[in-house]
Amino acid sequence: MTRKIAGQLAVRSARSLRTAFGMPDGLPLRLWLASLALVWAVAVPVVWLLWCGRRFDLVQHEVAAWRPFTVLMAPEAVAILWRLRRARVFQAVVVVTGICLFSWLMNQGPFWLLGRFWLYVWLLLFALACAGWAGKVAPALGLRVFFAAKLGMTLFAMALFAAVLVQFGTLHGAFSSPPIFCNIRHFDFALVVVLGVGLAWLGGASRDARGGLHGAAAIALFVAAGYFLVWSGGRGGMLAFGVTWAMLWWRAERAGRRVLHRALGLLAVSAVLVLATGQGEFFLSQLLRMGADSLNAMSSSRLAIWGEALQRWAAGGVPGMLFGYEPDAFFGFGIGRALDPDIVQPHNALIQFLLEFGLAGTAVIVAAWAWLLRRCFRVLRQPHGVDVTSCVAALLVGLSVYAQVDGVLYHVVPLTAVAFLVAWFVRAGPVAARSPAMLGR
């Protein structure tokens, strides 16, 4: 009886997923299961909040959520690695990685006991699995599965914030202890991704009945997401979306620019609503910070944190400077604690990687990221509409800027989104750009 009920639930779940995402009937079972596992990996903060409340190790459970998807897509991930094995760039990466691991062993000891090391291992495997999955499913379907999971998580968070506002008349308490996310800036990460990819929906790229957001729903999404982004006063998030918007506007066709102007207008409406509802405290405080009497005060002490981190990096000797000290070195060294006892990362991806991987490892990472950005600019410099490939390319540029002022490439939830978006863009983005099919078709 139990098996029968479980089977019926599995069938109903599969049908619901197919209806929600417009999945084809002939999709192989393994890809069905992998799609479900991807939804689980993206939405795991909501799942664990409902399951065991706020007291849980998000990093541990997020990494655990990567594993089912990675295992299901292991054949494709292994195939990608096998094709890369003869590439000189890949061989150089392997050599530099080996030296970095030796440096970690000399500086830290048994680095494999550190959770951050295993996070990087599983992140690499997860990204390869995402690339394999993106190459197996239709480009529009692949991005829709990810976006629907991310959107669902974000809408759930916004509903909880709205409940707090209705109950207490203010969101002040939710700023320091937000629902789902352990820090309000993590909510900003999700909002930027939803707004960036959501531009394609606002532009009418998805209007069919199988899963697309219609005009009214897209407008409501932008106003709601913009409201919370403005309310939180997250300058990094606003900067990231601003860069995304500007990159799209750069060579957008006339119809595309109308969409972008509409998006800007909706965000302006959101800002007015924040002030009209009396929730503009954090937004206004960040505006006032821009008039501070020093650059360090304007940057929320980031300049002081970066300076201390660079001094610690240079103080460890040539081997550490070249090949890094340990996974999560910023936190391990206790940098910045005098300024903020709760700080765990430098709010700058380059400094984070310098401490962890040294100059050599950081050079490899920067070279790989430069190659990615070159592909993004190749898409964006051509006249285009507000289509999914252009939106993801622009969003990756925006997230690259965001990573230099916040922990986009440190915290595990935004890392999940970045890993998927990079894998999708590299593997499926060019296919989507050549296809007339849009995100919701």
Image: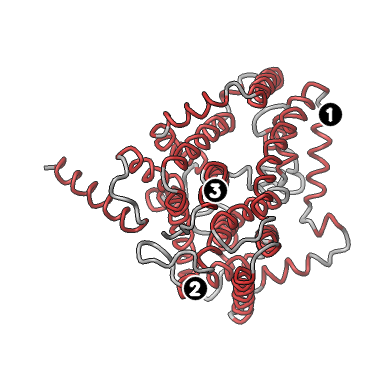
Looking at the image, which residue is at 38% across and 40% down?
A: 34
User: In the image shown, does 360 or 333 lie closer to the viewer?
Assistant: 360
Kindly identify the amino acid type of the residue bearing the numbered disc 3: Gly
Element on which disc 3 rests:
helix
All told, the count of numbered labels is 3
Judge left or right: residue 21 versus residue 80.
Answer: left
Residue 414: x and y in percent read 57, 48
Q: Is residue 79 above or below residue 223?
A: above
Q: Is residue 276 above or below residue 287?
A: below
Judge left or right: residue 283 versus residue 133.
Answer: right
**Between discs 2 and 1, the one toward the N terminus:** 2
User: In the image shown, does 203 or 7 lie closer to the viewer?
Assistant: 203
Residue 35: x and y in percent read 38, 45
Q: Which residue is mark 2?
A: 220
Q: Which residue is mark 1?
A: 315
Q: Are marks 2 and 3 in contact (CB under 8 Å)?
A: no
Quarter of the image for the C terminus: give it: bottom left
Crowd tier of the residue under label 3, counting other residues whose Cα lies within 10 Å: few below 14, some 14–19, many 20 or above: many
* Marks 1 and 3, how far apart at CA: 43 Å
Crowd tier of the residue under label 1, counting other residues whose Cα lies within 10 Å: few below 14, some 14–19, many 20 or above: few
Looking at the image, which residue is at 35% across and 62% down?
A: 210
Element on which disc 1 rests:
loop
Q: Which residue is mark 3?
A: 429
**Residue that sits furthest to the bottom in the current view:** 276
**Between discs 2 and 3, the one toward the N terminus:** 2
Looking at the image, which residue is at 23% across and 52% down?
A: 12
Crowd tier of the residue under label 2, counting other residues whose Cα lies within 10 Å: few below 14, some 14–19, many 20 or above: few
